[in-house]
Amino acid sequence: MRRGRRPPSAPRAAGHGGARTVSYVYTSLLGFTVVAALLTVSPGPDFAVVLRTALGAGRRAALCSALGIATGCFVWGLAGAAGLTAMLSASRVAYDALRIAGAAYLMWLGFQALRSARRAARTPAGAAASETPAEALRDGPEALEGGVTADGPRTPWRAFRTGLLTNVLNPKVGVVYMSLLPQFIPHGAPVVATTLMLVAVHAVLGMLWLGAVALAVHRARAVFRRPRVHRRLEQLTGTVLFGLGAAVAAETAR
């Protein structure tokens, strides 16, 4: 008796593993979005820098600062994908040197804000109110929106550079990316592309949050342009920035 031929086995569904990877990526993306949103709204130097820029140079400059901060996220994301963040964490000297540079920069920004508040306190109460629109235009169009401090970043480029340096000189961002991002990169997914996608999510969330802060300050500019209120806010943001820098410096010196 002849044996019948064995029926051919059913072919595996093409792309089954790829579809599963895509599903894992979407799940990881959703989870990371929640975590990144919590990190974004946490008070820190980014918030203080954008707030002070919005108070001193107006809405456009504040949005440029937020864009600089978002660009800094991509710098750290690329550094992490290239392995530079791991090298930075492994080298205590390099890590501390970058922290000291970041602390010095934050303290300098805080000092500028405090000095601006002190100068405003010496200005006669009617001096700011007596400024005409033509005089304000000499300081740039943003002066009509929210006023320009003596040491605030007047141009969009300076505002962008301030936001970028605030982020790039903060090695904690790189350490957070190095420890957090790998948890949301599924096995089999392209590491660099997925890393940049997660960083893009964080950057977009940051732009939305910090942009909302800038727009809120712009809408309330009638209140914030009052000399007393403006001076107090400059003192507050200056104290916060200087205090953050001093805390980082003290922690590094231990």
Image (cartoon, grey):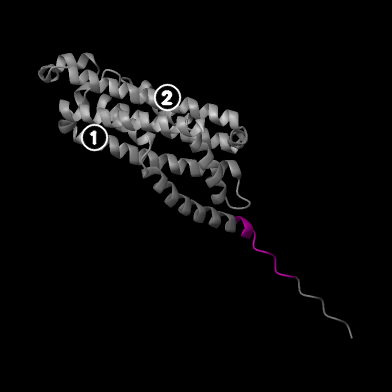
- Which SS type dominates the magenta stretch? loop
| Residue at position x 39%, y 33% in the image | 244
Q: Residue 107 at what x, y percent from top left?
A: 39, 25
For image coordinates 62% across by 32% down, the residue present is 91
The quarter of the displayed image where residue 21 is located: bottom right
Q: Is residue 128 left or right of residue 249?
A: left
Q: Nearer the viewer, residue 88 or 181?
A: 88
Point out the frontmost of discs 2 and 1: 2
On the image, the x and y values in percent for residue 43 come to 36, 40
To which quarter of the image does residue 16 belong?
bottom right
**Residue 222 appears at what percent x and percent y?**
15, 31
Viewer-side residue, 191 vs 230: 230
Question: What amino acid is at disc 2?
Answer: Tyr
Pointer 2 residue = 105
Amino acid type, residue under disc 1 in the picture: Val
Residue at (63%, 51%) from the top-left corner?
188
Q: Would you name the residue on which mark 1 appears?
A: 217
Q: Is residue 125 visible?
A: yes
Q: Which residues are magenta?
A: 9-18
Q: Nearer the viewer, residue 236 or 181?
A: 236
Residue at 52% in and 37% down = 174
Q: Earlier in the sequence, mark 2 or mark 1?
A: 2
